[in-house]
Amino acid sequence: MEHLLSMEDLSTTEIEQLISRASEFKARKSDHPKYNDTFVANLFFENSTRTKSSFLVAEQKLGLNLVDFETSTSSVQKGESLYDTCKTLESIGVNLLVIRHPNNAYYEELRNINIPIVNGGDGSGQHPTQSLLDLMTIYEEYGYFKGLKVLICGDIKNSRVARSNYHSLTALGAEVMFSSPPEWQDESIGASYVDIDEVINQVDIVMLLRVQHERHHKSEVSTFKAQDYHQQYGLNQQRYSKLQSHSIIMHPAPVNRGVEIADPLVEASQSRIFKQMENGMYLRMAVIDTILKGRKG
Ligand code: CP
């Protein structure tokens, strides 16, 4: 694996290998490799808590040297392009870039960058490390993917998580359904849309998505009624009580408590939301280790 840009670039074997490596790190089955001669920069052009912090912890556990980069204090503020920023870091001696950017497929303009790029999320396009940590969490729970019924609820149109997970879960043999208000549906993805109340008692996984107001038109934000949304599409206590006892709740977070999911359910016994975050750090270690090991040959 040279880069990690999209789940569509990974084979199911590569996905399974990454989950296995992350699980080894989690179980401390192998010593951490130490990349003391390797430099990494994390370029976050969109806000982040989980992705950025877990990459930082993963990188430090692997002994990488971190190159400080903040868009607010960099020459991005003087108009430097993404390509020139990345080419500069490559020239200085940075060996790997983690990038989150609001533009879909921003990495297409970086084809002449000769160091690995890990996509930390591109607009509404892809969020491959989120998808991999979701898959790791599901695999820990069930030990398989084939035949699992997965309901993904919410702001599908704007969700790089829905896009990445639909592709990877389907490739691994799971059945993925969507539930969403008509205005946030995206027919190009390929899943069928269902009524949450008709399937809630049959699914193995309910994945709630954050309502992404920052990607909505102003008029949509001003007319959005959180209570109505929660009532029609959210996971409330009544729906939670209909879940099968083995079913789990997931959410990529940050969570709008009381909107996508009732506040007390975020840490309910069937929620794996904080487990997803825990797994994210190990999964990101696995991604970086796999890429760097490949380069060392
Ligand atoms: N799930 C996720 O990507 O969270 P952050 O935006 O906080 O990184």
Image (tube, rainbow, N blue to C red):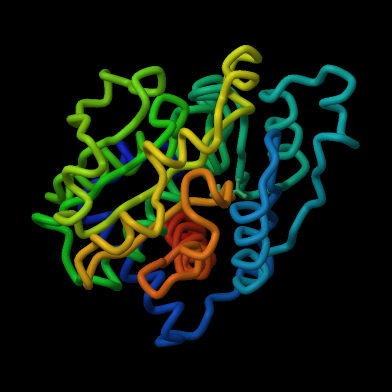
Tell me the residue at 16%/52% (across/down): 149
Residue 227 pos. (x, y %): 52, 38
Quadrant assignment for the C terminus: bottom left
Tell me the residue at 45%/53% (across/down): 251
Front-most of residues 180 and 110: 180
Residue 102 pos. (x, y %): 61, 27
Labels in figure, total: 0
Residue 259 pos. (x, y %): 52, 44
**Quarter holding residue 286:** bottom left
On screen, residue 174 versus residue 104, left or right, reads: left
Front-most of residues 73 and 80: 73
Tell me the residue at 31%/54% (across/down): 239
Front-most of residues 211 and 222: 222
When the figure is inspected, residue 128 is found, relative to residue 288, above or below; the finding is: above
**Quarter holding residue 276:** bottom left
Tell me the residue at 31%/43% (across/down): 152
On screen, residue 4 versus residue 62, left or right, reads: left
Residue 112 pos. (x, y %): 55, 25
Q: Is residue 117 visible?
A: no
Q: Is residue 115 visible?
A: yes
On screen, residue 27 versus residue 150, left or right, reads: right
